[in-house]
Image (tube, rainbow, N blue to C red):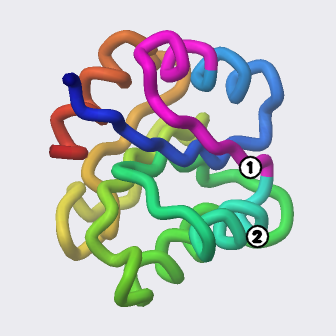
């Protein structure tokens, strides 16, 4: 039986959220979503995904604060995070352990099929 993957999507744009969710559900992922960082953190308290897809520009707590909270929590610190943002330039630091995210994708370059495959690779 194939592995059942779980992904949390934290994205405030309803259209983008719906598109990403549909693609992951089509790939048989167990998907939870939130349009706020606060909602995403609440979901993490009850449910541990294999990966997180995170927007940076969110209402209330932004994606960077969410990421710091996740990285500082013992239960969540190793969950791979892919940042998907409209900000063309990622932070000056390259992805990796120090940044807290594994990959930075500009939404205009987002290929949903590739995103699903990246999450499968990171979630192993």
Give the residue number, with chain letter if any, for mark 2. 38
Instruction: In this rendered view, identify the residue nearer to me: 69 or 123.
Output: 123
Q: Give the x, y percent position of residue 96.
A: 18, 62
**Front-most of 98 and 39?**
39
* Whether residue 52 is situated above or below residue 105 in the rendered picture: below
Local packing at callout 2 (Cα closer than 10 Å; few below 14, some 14-19, many 20+) is: some
Label 1 Cα crowd, 10 Å radius (few <14 / some 14-19 / many 20+): some
Who's the residue at 24% across and 33% down the image?
3
Residue 72 is one of the magenta-drawn residues: no
- The answer to whether marks 2 and 1 mark residues whose Cβ atoms lie closer than 8 Å is yes
Camera-side residue of 109 and 89: 109
Tell me the distance, in whole angstroms, between the alpha carbons under discs 2 and 1: 8 Å
Percent of width and height locating residue 61? 75, 71
Q: Residue at x 82, y 28 (%)?
A: 14
Residue 91 rendering spot, x and y as whole percentages: 39, 59
Dot 1 falls on a residue whose secondary structure is: strand
Q: Quadrant of the N terminus?
A: top left
Relative placement, left or right, of 124 versus 52 is: left
Q: Is residue 52 left or right of residue 14?
A: left
Give the quadrant of residue 74: bottom left
Q: Is residue 24 above or below residue 69?
A: above
Q: Is residue 23 magenta?
A: yes
Up the image or down, 59 lies above or below 75; here it is above
Image quadrant where one finds the C terminus: top left
Query: Residue 20, which numbered label?
Result: none
- The image shows residue 106, relative to residue 95, as above or below, that is above
Residue assigned mark 1: 34
Residue shown at 30%/69% (left/top)?
99
Stretch in magenta: 22-35
Name the residue at 40% across, 75% down: 76
Occupied quadrant, residue 28:
top left
Q: How far across and down, in percent of the image, does residue 117 sit?
A: 26, 22
């Amino acid at each position: 039986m194939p592995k059942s993957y779980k992904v949390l999507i934290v994205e405030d744009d309803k259209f983008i959220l719906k598109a990403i969710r549909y693609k992951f559900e089509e790939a048989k992922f167990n998907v939870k979503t939130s349009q706020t960082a606060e909602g995403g953190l609440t979901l993490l308290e009850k449910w541990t995904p294999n990966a997180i897809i995170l927007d940076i520009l969110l209402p209330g707590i932004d994606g960077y604060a969410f990421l710091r909270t996740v990285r500082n929590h013992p239960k969540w610190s190793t969950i791979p995070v892919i940042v998907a943002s409209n900000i063309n330039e990622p932070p000056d630091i390259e992805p990796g352990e120090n940044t807290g995210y594994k990959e930075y994708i500009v939404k205009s370059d987002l290929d949903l099929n590739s995103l699903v495959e990246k999450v499968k690779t990171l979630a192993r």
